[in-house]
Image: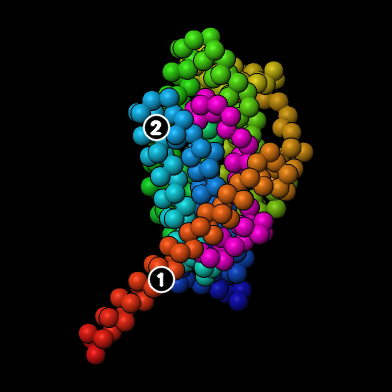
Amino acid sequence: MAAFEKIFQDRIDSEIRIEPKDWMPEAYRKTNLRQISQHAHSEIVGMLPEGNWISRAPTLKRKAILIAKVQDEAGHGLYLYSAAETLGMSREEMINDLHSGKAKYSSIFNYPAVTWADMGAIGWLVDGAAIMNQVMLTRTSYGPYARAMVRICKEESFHQRQGFDILLTLSMGTEEQKAMCQDAINRWWWPSIMMFGPHDSESQHSEQSMKWKIKRFGNDELRQRFVDMIAEQVKVLGMTLPDPDLKWNEERSHYDFGKINWEEFWNVVKGNGPCNKQRLDARKKAWEDGAWVREAALAHATKRKEKKAGKAA
């Protein structure tokens, strides 16, 4: 076993991707399965706060753009579920784990989207944080995951620009629209910072994931990059970030920022956020309502297989 593990690590160190049929440590398989399925769940649950605004978008153009974005997120979920299935777990098992609360998804989606400006803040901040996390995953060591992330990252960059455009339009509008823009930024800033997860020193998976090159950068480094990026972009909007401690540190060449409310973060992760129950209830209902579609698709596939077998005979 030690010999296999050495060969495996040598391949990782040599930047050779691991494929589904390759030998891998069980812990590597489980770590990838946990991360990829959680990522898939996040894409699917992430459709909910935005889907609620499709019928209330202010213009037909905005409606069409938002529909396209939500459709992209559904596709991302499918790519990722497919990648996770190569590790030996069925999609139904993954979804059952989500519905039971065993599997997690990004805590950010347990916050309500209360105004149209939230569509902008989610695109700019939430998808911006996602891109910061996900670009490195195009180089992750597990092949199916890395390949899925190439297209996902391209589409996420569109999502971030869409969000920034919404906020930019509001920032140039009436005083009421400007106030709406600032309010959305105020509510989504800290949850987006929390998306990067706990400090590396407190993350039970970070060190091993870095060794296996599942991750390329730590949570704290990515969070700092995100803060540096957004602190500059917010100036274009003429808005402010809700952090009195945010200031440029010449010595570090980075922005300093305030303390994160980790109590709130863990409370949401444990299922006690503003919308946890609402989000899971919506996903369970969608799964139950779609049962007839899955049954019909399976019956059709079975019928085609039998017909093909009959012709071959």
Mark drawn on residue 63: 2
Give x and y (percent) for residue 184: 58, 24
In the rendered view, tell whether residue 274 sits above or below residue 13.
above
- Single out the residue that lies furthest toward the bottom: 313
Quarter holding residue 71: top left
Q: Magenta segment range? A: 91-120
Q: Position of residue 241 (x, y in %)?
A: 61, 20
- List the residue tagged with mark 1: 298
- Mark 1 nearby-residue class (10 Å; few <14, some 14–19, many ≥20): few
288 lies above or below 65: below
Coloring basis for residues: rainbow
Where the C terminus falls, by quadrant?
bottom left
Amino acid found under the numbered disc labelled 2: Lys
Is residue 84 shown to the viewer in this render?
A: yes
Farthest residue, direction left: 311
The residue most toward the top is 175
Q: Which tag, 2 or 1, sits closer to the chain's start?
A: 2
Say which of 100 and 144 sits in front: 100
Q: Main secondary structure of the magenta part?
A: helix
Q: Residue at x 62, y 51 (%)?
A: 281
Q: Secondary structure at mark 1?
A: helix
Q: Position of residue 80 (x, y in %)?
A: 47, 55
Looking at the image, which residue is at 59% across and 41% down? Answer: 109
Residue plotted at (65% across, 30% down): 190
* Residue at the spot 49% in from the left edge and 10% down from the top edge: 174
In reply to whether residue 259 is colored magenta, the answer given is no
Q: Secondary structure at mark 2?
A: helix
- Residue 292 in percent (x, y) is at 45, 64
